[in-house]
Amino acid sequence: MQFLQLTKPRVNALIVFTAVIGMLLAYPVGIGWDVPLMLTATGGIWLVAGAAAAFNCLVEQAIDRNMARTRDRPTVAGSISTVQVLLLAGIVGGIGLMILYHYVNPLTMWLTLGTFVGYAVIYTVILKPATPQNIVIGGASGAMPPVLGWAAVAGVVDPQALLLFLIIFAWTPPHFWALALYRKKEYAKAGVPMLPVTHGDQFTKLHLLLYTLMLSAATLLPFVVGMAAWFYLLSAVVLNAMFIWFAVKLYRRYTDALARKTFNFSILYLALLFAVLLIDHYAPLAARF
């Protein structure tokens, strides 16, 4: 149970969700799903993501000790040892990679391994303590799940999968900067150079707004290239208007409560955006019945 807590189940749920959406979008409309393959790929991705999260918790013990939302983690409380975490993460991650290599395809395994290294090592160990751009650069790892899902069923990474990557990549900074704004004192105490700590609230709020506008533009690309139709476009416009409203309001009249609401909405925003993209993809099939 302690190790399960370290795998960050709520974060992992969003990772798995976007990976599954990537799988479903990779199938042309009218082509049957390979359900056993999808379940196997989902399990492998989930195991490796959980191992990466556990390794992240291990490396960030000092940071987690100063954060209200993480100070109860077993790695901080000392109820699970470093050796135990490394052993469990190694076993779980290794099993996940083995499943992906032998029962899905080697491409998905290598992409998943690269994502693990990008998150657990490049972001956690190198970028997060070194630069306020940690979220921007490190966001590449968090944007990979739909690409992994796409590669699992298609065996290749098509341009459409890269659009899904771009959307999450653009979403990550405003999502995390909203959190960093109302957790600024905790990040400062932990010595993490998040943008509000190094450049102040006003600078961060401006960049949060600018990245939200960039995200809104990125979400229109599936319609532009013919990957999605009008239902997706209209839904994306509504969701973007709501996110921009939050960002503008934060910029003009900031409160911690509003920043928290913006952070929570950003999670709902991404889930709904991918859900409507999936609905739009299969709408022609539904229209036949």
Image: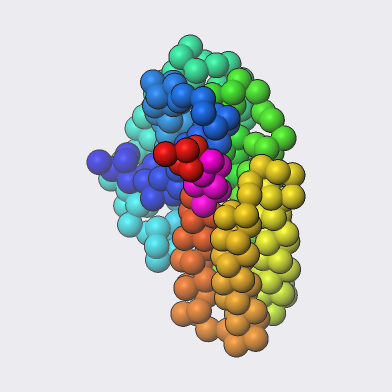
Q: Please say if 108 is above or below 8.
A: above
Residue 218 seen = yes
**Measured from the top left, where is residue 200 in percent x and y?**
68, 76
| Residue 279 in the figure: left or right of residue 219 | left
Indicate the quadrant where residue 17 lies: top left
Q: Quadrant of the C terminus?
A: top left
Whether 52 is among the magenta residues is no
Indicate the quadrant where residue 44 lies: top left
Indicate the quadrant where residue 157 lies: top right
Q: Residue furthest bottom?
A: 253
What residue lies at 48% left-to-right and 43% top-to-bottom? 287
| Residue 58 in the figure: left or right of residue 173 | left
Magenta residues, dominant SS class: helix
| Residue 45 in the figure: left or right of residue 147 | left
**Measured from the top left, where is residue 64 in percent x and y?**
44, 56
**Measured from the top left, where is residue 95 in percent x and y?**
41, 20
Whether 282 is among the magenta residues is yes
Q: Which residues are magenta?
A: 276-284
What residue lies at 73% left-to-right and 59% top-to-bottom? 217
Q: Residue furthest front?
A: 289
